[in-house]
Image (cartoon, helix red, strand yellow):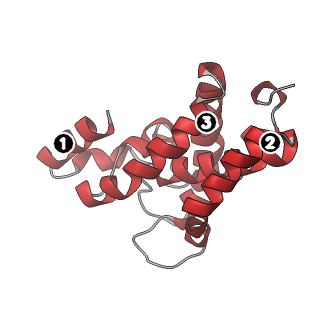
Amino acid sequence: MLWLVEAANTLTDHQLNVFGIYPRELAALPGLFFWPLLHANFQHLIMNTTPLAVLGFFVALRGASVFVRTCLVILLVGGLGVWLFGRPAFHIGASGLVFGFFGFLVAVSFYEKSLSALGIASFAILYYGGLIWGVLPSDSFVSWEAHLFGLMAGVLAARLPTVRRG
C-alpha cells in the first residue's frame, strides 16, 4: 500500500503530503492516521521499507490483534507527540512507525523477560540499533520528532498488558 500511495503522490507532485502531521493545526489532526503512508520521494520510501517489513514482521508474530493495537498506539500517541511538540513542518514517513516497532520489540523483552522476546530484541538491536541516533535533531528534512515520539509510543505499547504474553 505504501508503494501505491507514493506512486499516486509522485503523480500529483507530492500534493498528498499536506495530509501529514502539521503541528498544532487542528485541521491537520487527521494526519495522525496518514503520516506513515506519505513519503517525500521513492528514496525516502525505500529507506523505510525494509526495516518496516522486518520489524513489523516480528511485531506481527505476536498476533494480529497485538499488531493492530501496537500500530494504533504508535500512530496515535506518537503522532500526537509530533502534533503537540514538533516543529512547524509537514511530518511524513513510515520511520516513526519503524522507531515504534523497534521500541516495542526492545521494551517487550524487558517487560516479558522471555527467551524468545530477548532473542528478537537482540536481533532488532544488532541490525537496527544504529537508528537510535535518529531521535536526535540532525538534518532539517528529517523528522527526528516522529522518530522520538514513535519510539516512545512503541515502548508505551509494549507496556500495555493486552500486548504482552502471560
Label at residue 7: 1
Q: Which picture quadrant has residue 137? A: bottom right
Identity of the residue drawn at 45% across and 42% down: 53
Three-letter code for the amino acid on which mark 2 is drawn = Leu
* 3D distance between C-alphas at marks 3 and 1: 27 Å
**Mark 2 against mark 1, which lies toward the viewer?**
2
Q: Is residue 113 above or below residue 61?
A: below
Side (left or right) of 94 relative to 4: right
- Where residue 160 sits: x, y (%)? 81, 33
Q: Is residue 85 above or below residue 37?
A: below
Identity of the residue drawn at 60% across and 45% down: 101
- The answer to which of marks 3 and 1 sits earlier in the sequence is 1
Three-letter code for the amino acid on which mark 1 is drawn = Ala
- The answer to which of marks 2 and 1 sits earlier in the sequence is 1
Q: Dividing the image into 4 quarters, which one contains the C terminus? A: top right
Q: Which picture quadrant has residue 132? A: bottom right
Res 126 visible: yes
Residue bearing the label numbered 2 = 115
Residue bearing the label numbered 3 = 59
